[in-house]
Image (tube, grey):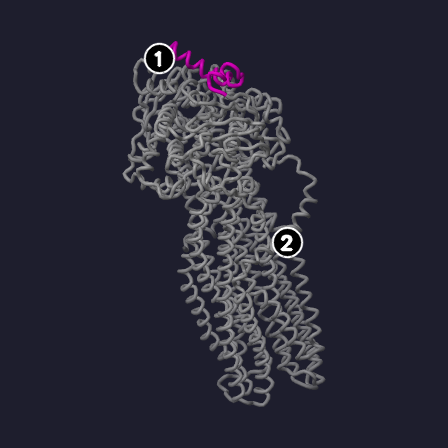
């Protein structure tokens, strides 16, 4: 976005959206509904494993205190076997938990993704504009994955880690109440260390990520502009700029590394000093006979366990923070209301009044100003309507109102004599063929692409559409014909070829209305002319809306709307407009002088 | 794999000192931390039971222990700092180098790869190298030290029990590698499915408006659901498999722990003399070691998986670095003055050996002449430009500028004689003023505004939030036409001897184009210019028109000559006026 002065309202608005987001996020929980069993049993089994793990040091203490003290070999053997048995049980429990966690997380993730994608399909153009398609893609793929991972880790660790901390503490208390005071000093201390380090480093990591994004942007731009950069011999400046960007990354990474590197050693230190304290005070307690040597060993063991659990807990917090951020971004999409759909499904085919605009104005949500203002016109069956005007004058906006991609903010747009908002959108749009400005093709064969309007289209229909669009020549010259593969984005085709297939795609099944949004720009005049000729003869009943910058493309239109800054400054036939529309005259003049020149030639 | 590793290590050779320090600190820190359990064991042994605690010895041990702990902490911290420095600085150099390289490879290489792919090498692959290789190596290293260290300590306590531990350890290893192998298959499947899903979503949701316009939503949903379901199924499986590692190795560790406990306890009891002497304290430290000893094995198996990943990334990065660079031109001469005359002599060229394109092309362009290149869509009109600016090299023949062979002068002095406006606009993230001054960084604000005015861009620039200081980028909301105006202003500011306009006005509306045309005519006065266009009206007055078809030049001459010829040009020209 263009970065103007950022608004000061921002901060206040942020607080509101934050509160709102939090309530929104809980809505994602409904996708866990079908997995209640896993959600309860998973952590439960993990708990069992943790309990068994906690018992092990106790058993070891018994070996020392009873087995060794009384030289009871049988007892030692029995207890060792018990440890192995506990291990086996623990293993089974853990595997059960992991299984349930994976099942639940992926089940949840799959349902969430499906629902999210379904929801995306319901969004209106203005909602899509709000989030942007690339961000939508990210949310459907990456964010759902992060949340899915969060669920998985939640089941696996969220219960286990805190339980181990608490459990170890309880065990310690049960061994020796007074000695366990060391515990209650050490555990919070380590937690505090973890907390402060994370609070300090998380924003730093974010900054590092931003620097990385910056370097990524520079790389992309320099690759895209490789020709220009070389033509201007600016390679060295590009390299210099990039060098600075990567230096930023390394300095920031090193800076954040300095702090986060403290975590493990400090935790190691606090824990071991805790152990030292345990031994010191424990020694005193042993001396007065209120503690045994074996119990002291167990105590030391629990100390170690706590540390490990706390480190896991810290990682868990990181995972959850990420998952929450992603969940927020996902619920943002869910909170966009689906497009209001109308109910009328049977369209009156006999209606002759195909399109009518009555006093239509439209403003994009983001901007206050109307992009089109007070437009009135009507088009009959089989007629051709031209829309002409300069860049950004509202031509495309006007065309987008017909299939109800956007809703008029004022006035009514009627198609087949009925308000477009009352139609079922799918029904309406199936009648309309659209050729967008930018020719986008999809991975698959030419045939796959041609079946977009109608999944059941026959090869005859496809070929006749390709013929009208002047695309059949090059498609058929390929040995694979309709089965020619188109790679992602149509990289294996030239701009003109892509555009012709994109045109043909909209013609399949002879739509009632055809909208060509300045979509012949990559065609040379010859091809353009042949296309228009073929179009009129092959589809006489199709009403054509042709947005164009070339007056030659529009001279035979039944009606031309001349747009200037959102307003229709002239509506009429070519001849009429030349008489009374100065803007049209100006555009046309260029053409006329060419014709005169041609006559002179 | 070793070769790649060596090469990465060679990259970090300037930071050898950090590498050495890492090893030194790792050795010190880890061995000190390993000594801790020994002292703890000894301390435990001081506390035999009621009234038999040896406090003088206990105090001495504890003081000593505390200092060992603190020293070890310090060394561990220093070790991480050194690893970080080593990793991040190496990565910085690697990134700079690969970026450098991309400025020096022939354009053919860049054209032949998607921008996303190459960007991913600079950003993601190198990130993986940093995580997996450099930090991984450090982890591997400290893991190995820990294992060896623990082993030594265990040996000093009790050789026989230590041997038992050594015999049992492969269990953990075997278990981990078995699981990794089993999960590898489903993991590969999972990542493939994920790729499928992402590219489907990229295509569908990325073109959501088109999907809606064609009422393709339901079909897209069906396709998505299919991939998604499969991904969910395989994903759950792969995740479960890979998550088996932890509990399994934990179990094996438990078994080792039990074995140590058993043997140790028997040793203390003393009935089995072949086990050697043991005390409760020694047993306690032995237990601690057996815990510590097995942990690095888990880590190492993780590191190895990451390492493989990193090696693959490193290979991708090195494959870019190994690309042939365009020839060094430092020994070439500068082209200082240029009259804008050009001469193509017997030029042969094709992009690939299989398809012949330009064959025996000859053209003599005098100073100030206007050359037009026309032809149907996709006929290779830009090829001549690619050759002139040496983006691609000719196969045979020669091209001269101002009487000098273009292959005998430096790139820079050749290219700065050309001002080029392409069909595909290119603006970079930066202010409008910076974008306009791209070819002339020293231009004053007045000159910039002057250039913008001359191409009728001043009006819209003024209306931007911050005028000429507004930051713009490729997807910043400027229209294609507005971006093109900025690119044209860029050339206006440079005023080079030769102009190239490659469909420069195709995305600008007619009214604006009319005005720019006037500006161009002014700019072209006295300068040689190449115009590529499909609107033939704009090029009629050219001195020479080259008519191209299927990559070759099929006709050549002035408008009048070509019209008389009644050939392909004639047909092309007439078609635009019949409607």
Any mark on residue A23, and which? Answer: 2
- SS at circle 1: helix
Q: Nearer the viewer, residue B270 or A51?
A: A51
Task: For residue B236, say whether it is visible.
Answer: yes
- Does the magenta segment cover residue A556? no
| Residue A36 position (above or below residue A259) | below
| Label 2 in the same subunit as label 1 | no
Q: Which is in the foreground here, disc 2 or disc 1?
A: 2
Q: Residues within 10 Å of mark 1 (few under 14, many from 20)?
A: few
Task: For residue B12, say whether it is visible.
Answer: no
Q: Position of residue B89 (x, y in %)?
A: 55, 49
Q: Indicate the chain on which mark 1 is placed.
A: B
Compared across the picture, whether A308 is left or right of B329 comes to right
| Quadrant that contains the C terminus of chain A | top left
Compared across the picture, whether A508 is left or right of B289 comes to left
Any mark on residue A144, and which? Answer: none
Q: Residue at x 66, y 66 (%)?
A: A270
| Quadrant that contains the N terminus of chain A | top right
| Residue B152 position (above or below residue A586) | below
Q: Indicate the chain on which mark 2 is placed.
A: A
| Residue A519 position (above or below residue A60) | above
Q: Position of residue B548 (x, y in %)?
A: 34, 24
Q: CA distance from mark 2 to mark 1?
A: 74 Å
Q: Position of residue B437 (x, y in %)?
A: 56, 27
Q: Residue lying furthest left in this view?
A: A479
Q: Residue lying furthest top in this view?
A: A600
Any mark on residue B560, and which? Answer: 1
Write down the region rendered in magenta: A572-601
Q: Residue at x 40, y 57 (%)?
A: B189
């Amino acid at each position: 976005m263009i970065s103007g002065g950022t608004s000061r309202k921002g901060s206040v608005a942020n607080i509101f959206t934050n509160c709102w987001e939090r309530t929104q996020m809980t809505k994602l929980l409904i996708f866990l509904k079908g997995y209640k069993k896993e959600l309860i049993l998973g952590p439960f089994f993990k708990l069992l494993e943790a309990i068994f793990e906690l018992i092990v040091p106790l058993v070891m203490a018994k070996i020392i205190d009873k087995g060794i003290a009384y030289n009871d070999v049988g007892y030692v053997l029995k207890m060792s076997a018990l440890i192995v048995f506990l291990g086996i049980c623990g293993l089974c429990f853990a595997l059960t938990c992991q299984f349930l966690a994976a099942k639940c997380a992926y089940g949840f993730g799959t349902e969430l993704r499906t629902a999210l994608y379904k929801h995306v399909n319901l969004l209106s153009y203005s909602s899509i504009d709000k989030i942007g398609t690339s961000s939508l893609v990210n949310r459907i793929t990456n964010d759902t994955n992060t949340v899915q991972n969060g669920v998985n880790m939640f089941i696996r660790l969220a219960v286990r880690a805190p339980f181990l901390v608490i459990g170890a503490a309880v065990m310690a208390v049960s061994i020796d109440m007074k000695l366990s005071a060391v515990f209650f000093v050490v555990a919070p201390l380590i937690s505090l260390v973890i907390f402060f380090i994370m609070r300090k480093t998380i924003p730093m990591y974010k900054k590092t990520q931003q620097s990385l994004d910056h370097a990524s942007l520079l790389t992309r731009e320099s690759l895209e502009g490789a020709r220009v950069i070389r033509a201007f011999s600016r390679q060295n400046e590009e390299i210099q700029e990039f060098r600075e960007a990567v230096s930023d990354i390394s300095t920031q990474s090193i800076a954040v590394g300095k702090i986060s590197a403290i975590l493990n050693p400090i935790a190691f230190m606090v824990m071991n000093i805790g152990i030292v304290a345990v031994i010191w005070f424990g020694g005193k307690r042993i001396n007065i006979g209120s503690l045994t040597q074996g119990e002291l060993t167990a105590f030391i063991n629990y100390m170690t366990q706590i540390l490990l659990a706390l480190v896991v807990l810290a990682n868990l917090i990181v995972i959850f923070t990420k998952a929450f951020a992603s969940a927020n971004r996902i619920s943002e999409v869910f909170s966009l209301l689906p497009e209001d759909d109308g109910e009328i499904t049977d369209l009156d085919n006999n209606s002759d009044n195909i399109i009518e605009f009555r006093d239509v104005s439209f403003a994009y949500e983001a901007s206050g100003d109307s992009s089109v203002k007070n437009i009135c016109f009507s088009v009959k069956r089989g007629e051709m309507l031209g829309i002409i005007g300069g860049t950004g004058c509202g031509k495309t906006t006007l065309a987008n109102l017909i299939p109800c991609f956007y809703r008029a903010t004022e006035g009514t747009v009627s198609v087949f004599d009925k308000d477009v908002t009352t139609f079922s959108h799918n029904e309406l749009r199936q009648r309309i063929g659209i050729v967008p400005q930018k020719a986008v093709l999809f991975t698959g064969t030419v045939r796959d692409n041609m079946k977009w309007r109608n999944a059941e289209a026959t090869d005859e229909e496809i070929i006749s559409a390709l013929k009208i669009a002047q695309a059949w020549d090059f498609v058929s010259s390929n040995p694979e014909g309709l089965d020619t593969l188109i790679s992602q984005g149509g990289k294996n085709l030239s701009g003109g070829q892509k555009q012709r297939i994109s045109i043909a795609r909209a013609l399949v099944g002879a739509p009632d209305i055809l909208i060509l949004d300045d979509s012949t720009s990559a065609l040379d005049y010859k091809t353009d002319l042949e296309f228009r000729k073929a179009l009129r003869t092959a589809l006489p009943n199709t009403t054509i809306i042709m947005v164009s910058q070339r007056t030659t493309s529009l001279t035979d239109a039944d009606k031309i709307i001349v747009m200037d800054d959102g307003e229709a400054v002239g509506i009429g036939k070519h001849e009429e407009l030349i008489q009374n529309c100065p803007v049209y005259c100006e555009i046309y003049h260029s053409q006329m002088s060419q014709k005169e020149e041609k006559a002179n030639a | 794999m070793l070769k790649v590793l060596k090469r990465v290590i060679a990259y970090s050779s300037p930071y050898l000192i950090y590498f050495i320090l890492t090893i030194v600190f790792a050795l010190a820190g880890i061995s000190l931390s390993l000594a801790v359990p020994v002292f703890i064991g000894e301390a435990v042994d001081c506390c035999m039971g009621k009234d038999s605690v040896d406090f003088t010895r206990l105090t001495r041990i504890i003081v000593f222990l505390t200092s060992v702990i603190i020293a070890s902490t310090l060394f561990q911290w220093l070790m991480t700092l050194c690893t970080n420095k080593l990793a991040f600085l190496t990565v910085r150099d690697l990134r700079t180098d690969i970026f450098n390289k991309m400025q020096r490879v022939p354009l053919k290489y860049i054209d032949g790869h998607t921008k996303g792919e190459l960007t991913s090498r600079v950003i993601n692959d190198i990130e993986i190298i940093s995580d997996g290789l450099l930090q991984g190596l450090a982890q591997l290293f400290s893991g190995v030290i820990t294992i060896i260290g623990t082993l030594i300590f265990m040996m000093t306590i009790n050789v026989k029990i230590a041997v038992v531990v050594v015999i049992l350890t492969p269990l953990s290893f075997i278990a981990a590698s078995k699981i990794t192998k089993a999960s590898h298959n489903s993991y590969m499947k999972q990542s493939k499915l994920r790729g499928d899903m992402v590219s489907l979503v990229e295509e569908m949701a990325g073109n959501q408006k088109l999907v809606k316009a064609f009422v393709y939503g339901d079909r897209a949903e069906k396709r998505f659901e299919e991939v998604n379901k499969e991904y969910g199924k395989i994903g759950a499986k792969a995740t479960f498999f890979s998550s088996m590692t932890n509990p399994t190795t934990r179990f094996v560790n438990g078994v080792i722990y039990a074995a140590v406990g058993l043997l140790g306890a028997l040793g203390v009891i003393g009935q089995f003399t072949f086990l050697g002497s043991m005390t409760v304290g020694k047993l306690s430290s032995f237990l601690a070691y057996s815990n510590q000893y097995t942990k690095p094995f888990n880590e190492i198996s993780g590191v190895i998986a990451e390492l493989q990943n990193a090696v693959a990334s490193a290979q991708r990065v090195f494959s870019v670095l190994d690309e042939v660079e365009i020839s060094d031109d430092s020994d070439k001469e500068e082209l200082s003055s240029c009259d804008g005359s050009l001469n193509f002599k017997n030029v042969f060229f094709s992009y690939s050996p299989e398809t012949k394109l330009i064959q025996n092309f000859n053209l003599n362009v005098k100073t100030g002449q206007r050359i037009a290149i026309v032809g149907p869509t996709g006929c290779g009109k830009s090829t001549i430009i690619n050759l002139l600016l040496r983006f691609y090299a000719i196969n045979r023949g020669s091209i001269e500028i101002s009487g000098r062979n273009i292959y005998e002068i430096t790139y820079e002095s050749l290219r700065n004689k050309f001002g080029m406006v392409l069909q595909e606009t290119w603006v970079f993230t930066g202010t409008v003023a910076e974008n306009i001054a791209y070819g002339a960084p020293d231009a004053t604000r007045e000159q910039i505004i002057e250039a913008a005015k001359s191409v009728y861009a001043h009006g819209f620039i003024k209306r931007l939030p911050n005028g000429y200081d507004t930051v713009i980028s490729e997807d910043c909301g400027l229209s294609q036409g507005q971006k093109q105006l900025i690119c044209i202003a860029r050339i206006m500011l440079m005023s080079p001897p030769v102009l190239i306009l490659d469909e420069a006005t195709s995305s600008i509306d007619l009214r604006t184009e009319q005005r720019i045309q006037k500006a161009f005519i002014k700019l072209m006065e006295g300068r040689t210019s190449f115009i590529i266009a499909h609107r033939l009206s704009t090029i009629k007055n050219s001195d020479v028109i080259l008519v191209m078809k299927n990559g070759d030049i099929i006709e050549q001459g002035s408008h009048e000559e070509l019209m008389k010829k009644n050939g392909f040009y004639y047909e092309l020209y007439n078609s635009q006026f019949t409607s």
